[in-house]
Image: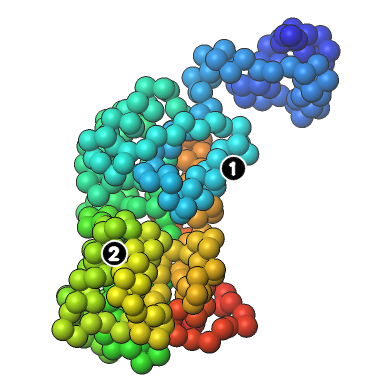
Amino acid sequence: MPTMADVARSAGVSVATVSHVLNDTRPVLPHTRRAVLDAMDELGYTPNTLARSLVTSRTRSIGLAVSAISNPYFTEILQGVEAGALEHGYSLLIADPHDDPEHERKVVQLLHERRVDGMIVAPSAEPGELVTYLARHHVPTVFLDRVIDVPADGAPRFDQVCAENAEPVTRLVTHLARLGHRRIALVAGVPGLSTTSERIAGYRHGLATAGLPHDERLVAHGDSATEAAERATATLLSLAAPPTALVTANNAMTIGALRALRERGLSVPEDIALCCFDDFAWADLFSPRLTAIAQPSREIGAEAVRVLLERLAAPDRPARTVRLPCTFVHRTSCGCAEQPEQPEKGTDP
């Protein structure tokens, strides 16, 4: 197996220069760097990652703590994180916090003990212990998908990357209102999550924009899960004046809502219109095809990596929150005819 000394001889440089090229510990002239890299390729040299981490105090690894990895939405985010990490020469260590605050803190501590350079975390609804741990140990962290409360001074304590949540739900509600619906219900997610509160706010703003009253009975929590959403939808359908249109706040809850509607023999959109937050691979295979808000899942993951690497390069820069726009995917479950073209991001349907 070739060594650094072999690479140095082949490139006509010192072993120290090879080390500087590998570890970025000192500037190296471009032509010298090229000679070292060419020698590594020619010899088939593989750097010793452990030795490299001892020199640089970096492991070139990122910890990713995301619940419900089996959820297609988070799976696509993971793909974005993985692609972004690989592009910059980083590996991933992955843990599932199960949306449990105590377990969340434990898995983050475990990742930290593995000496990851930084973390990307989708926080639970009660992230207090998590935030305390990360702040106490000065762990470079990006919060993903879900954001945490901003302090009174208006400056976020951690970098955060997520999709827009309120405006897309407003768009769904106003679209349904323009189709003539006056009782529009929402199957919301887990209470306490920023995604849940923001989507509820978007729902209420949509009602206000359409001149419709807000009826608390038309909001039921499906806890971001299929079975809970099925129960929540059943509750909504049991109202004395049931909704004529339904907005579901994530893909798992869309499945639960559809099960509840099927159980009662209701057809979409003939008996009740349906729009959902989260598009997924088979959404256009349903009959009718699902009108949905598509989140830029992979872009969110890749952006989280970029923001984390910026944090590692400039630890003292102010924290920031990055929000990415969603896309309205106009299909037929809302009651509209097939659309010949999809609107652009950020446009009103």
Disc nearer the start of the sequence (2/1): 1
- The x and y percentages for residue 247 are 34, 73
Tell me the tag on residue 230: 2
Q: Are marks 2 and 1 in contact (CB under 8 Å)?
A: no
Dot 1 amino acid type: Ala
Mark 1 packing: few (<14 Cα in 10 Å), some, or many (20+)? some
280 left or right of 185?
Answer: right
At a point 42% along the width and 40% down the height, the residue shown is 120
Q: Which residue is mark 1?
A: 83
Dot 2 amino acid type: Glu
Tell me the tag on residue 254: none
The quarter in which the N terminus is drawn is top right
Way the structure is coloured: rainbow
* Closest to the observer, 328 or 71: 71
* Closest to the observer, 25 or 201: 201
Q: Give the Cα separation between the discs numbered 2 and 1.
A: 35 Å
* Closest to the observer, 271 or 135: 271
